[in-house]
Amino acid sequence: MKKITNSILNFMSTRLGFVLTLLLLYWFKTMWAYSVDFNLDIQGPYQIFLAVINPLPISLLFIGLALYIKRTKLFYSLAFGIYLLLFIWLISNSIYYREFTDFVTVNTMLASSKVSAGLGAAALELFRPWDVIYILDFPILAFFFFKKWIRMDNRPFNKRASFAVTSLSAMLFSANLFLAEIDRPELLTRGFSNYYVVRALGLPAFLGYSANQTYAANKERSKASEADLKPVEEYIQQHYAKPNPEYFGMAKGRNVIYIHLESFQQFLIDYKLKVDDKEYEVTPFLNSLYHSKETFAFSNVFNQVKAGKTSDAETMIETGLFGLNQGSFMVNYGGTNTQQAAPFILSKNGYNSSAVFHGNAGSFWNRNTAYKQWGYNYFFDASYFTKQNSSNSFQYGLNDKYMLKDSIKYLERLQQPFYTKFITVSNHYPYTTSLSGDDLGFPLAKTQDETINGYFATANYLDSSIKAFFDYLKESGLYKNSIIVLYGDHYGISNSRNPALAPLLGKNSETWSSYDNAMLQRVPYMVVIPGMDKGGIIDTYGGEIDMLPTLEHLLGIESNKFLQVGQDMLSPEHDQIVAFRSANYFVTPEYTSYSGRTYYTKTGEEITNPDEKTKEELDKIREAANLQLKISDSIQTGDLLRFFKGNDLGKVNPDDYSYTNSFKALKKIEKEKGDKSTSLYNQRGNQSTVDLFKAPTYKELHPEDDSSSSTETSSSSSK
Ligand code: GP9
Ligand code: MN
């Protein structure tokens, strides 16, 4: 035993041994942070493997640089110095994470006030007793050196061997990157979430990733100037579609409730799925809304998202501007750009609060940062809801029924009128949920493609969740003074799977075309105004970019005061050119251009040899669609709103918002307002309405499983 200890100590007393000791210590501390401090949502052996190896390559690369140094003291100082820097980066993130459930980005560091918010005075409170683990090695190492159990090695390390260490670590890093791409294709280009990058590549690599993001964004930003606003402002005024006086302001002062229908396509509306000669209505409740006189139900609205998917849809409905041509706007610019988004606009137009409800981690799509720039008062993410387990959630968060039910205790405390958004998640690829199939009495489709088979079942689950929510709204009294907007964010079945879907739509897989793909980009857009009878199905062509101006006009706010590039879909002046988020892709009632081909929208007939007149018309449409994207891009990548003085909204200060302890904050406001509180809770004599939400309980859905029957009814968090 003594022999082994001696030889270990002897090895630690060589230069390479010292470097590897530091490497091991860094690895251990990182593992500690991964499991104790961060919530990385690591799933399956592959992701565990990636997480276990990812601290090694870069730390070896950096600490290993010291091996090139000849002088003894300098070698030890440098190796230890680099180790210290890696450690500081790790511990800063651990502490920051406790307050912000996210990692420190270069942007955050540049905006120093935010860092001090996380790491300054309040930081002391964020320390935990077990943080001792992070610093335990310092006194121990010092003691070992003091006792001469470890000694300094005066022999310089061989140059070639040093180079070998550098090359090895570089190679290991490439392998890490490669394996990470396999786990999550387009990890770095799409930037889903900071924790995806950390769990796959580690914290030092995340710093590089974040620096590059900031660099790229700043390059565009610094090129822009106030003069760039001129063409933008001209476009906004010329492109403005005046409101229809019949509808302008018809929902003024009502609560706004957005319901984000995840991956929900228009073809599901009124669709009947045939399985074994029986027909099933997939979304009976949404269909009833679609045909209601209380609903402006649009039949030709297209999604306009690109790689930012959900975040692109959110960007459009909140800011009236497009997502980016590459990556996600919310991720790359959402936390830094000056923005005038719906929650902020409404807060200046008589609205008393705003909130988002979503059962996934708050950092996904950089929501927790972007929402502050949008002026959202509250963001209830997974940490506010029932704890997730394999039967109440899957991949992207808490299942919709649980999320909606769990939201009520917060919703009822919001000061009215409020602006809210509920982001559902159960109907998300790969459409497999423990609640599908027999549990809900809804059968799976029987195609060769499992994704398609599950899609109808999860859509049906979403439908019944929405019904339960509407029942609650009616029962609680919120319904009659609200406007409820439902929209699908993007396709659920990708173009590559569409040929397999074709037979279910009465089409032929063999003759399936780009035209058919384009037509399937339709998503629902339903504006429910309880008590009105002017609704019906509206065939106007439009897209997600038009949703904000439409809402603003219904609320009696003119949209041309803001830099938004869409048009009110209820306006007679709406021009019906829908630009997809790719140059030269568009749809109008007459023409469709998609994947480099052009068609007549009505018939689907391809236009191969257009005559002069058609050519001219097509050019005009193409120009208009491209211009709309260009104007939006110039605002987004140039951060042009920072120069804008065309209205008196002012600027959001993101430091005014915090998404921790929101329940407490809500109750405090309620108490301060006393009788003047406009929350539903107060209106109902301080009685909670939670029990009015009548979704089936967990037990009803899983009669076979007694043990965890309380998961749904009890809300775990009291934040
Ligand atoms: C994640 C959810 C899904 O929180 O919104 O995003 P998507 O993958 O659809 O873009
Ligand atoms: Mn989505």
Image (tube, rainbow, N blue to C red):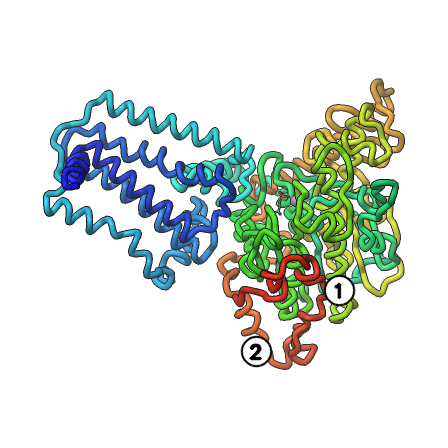
SS under mark 1: strand
Instruction: Tell me if the residue at label 1 has its CB under 8 Å from ligand 1.
Output: no
User: Badge 1, how many Cα within 10 Å: few under 14, some, many 20+?
Assistant: many
Q: In which quarter of the image is ligand 1?
A: top right
Q: Quadrant of the image for the N terminus?
A: top left
* Residue kind at label 1, given as amino acid type: Ser
User: Badge 2, how many Cα within 10 Å: few under 14, some, many 20+?
Assistant: few
Q: Residue at x 80, y 35 (%)?
A: 519
Taking the image as shown, residue 651 lies to the left or right of residue 575, namely left
On the image, the x and y values in percent for residue 695 come to 71, 62
Taking the image as shown, residue 147 lies to the left or right of residue 135, namely left
On the image, the x and y values in percent for residue 379 come to 57, 58
The quadrant in which residue 456 appears is: top right
Up-down: is 136 above or below 603? below
Front residue (pair 97, 657)? 97
SS under mark 2: helix
Residue bearing mark 1 = 482
Taking the image as shown, residue 482 lies to the left or right of residue 667, namely right
Up-down: is 181 above or below 710? above
Q: Which residue is drawn at 19% across and 32% down?
A: 15
Residue bearing mark 2 = 671
Front residue (pair 719, 348)? 719
Q: How far apart are marks 1 and 2 (CA)?
A: 24 Å
The quadrant in which residue 233 appears is: top right
On the image, the x and y values in percent for residue 374 come to 59, 54
Q: Is residue 619 visible?
A: no
* Residue kind at label 2, given as amino acid type: Lys
Up-down: is 410 above or below 510? below
Of the numbered discs in the image, which one, if any, rests on residue 664?
none
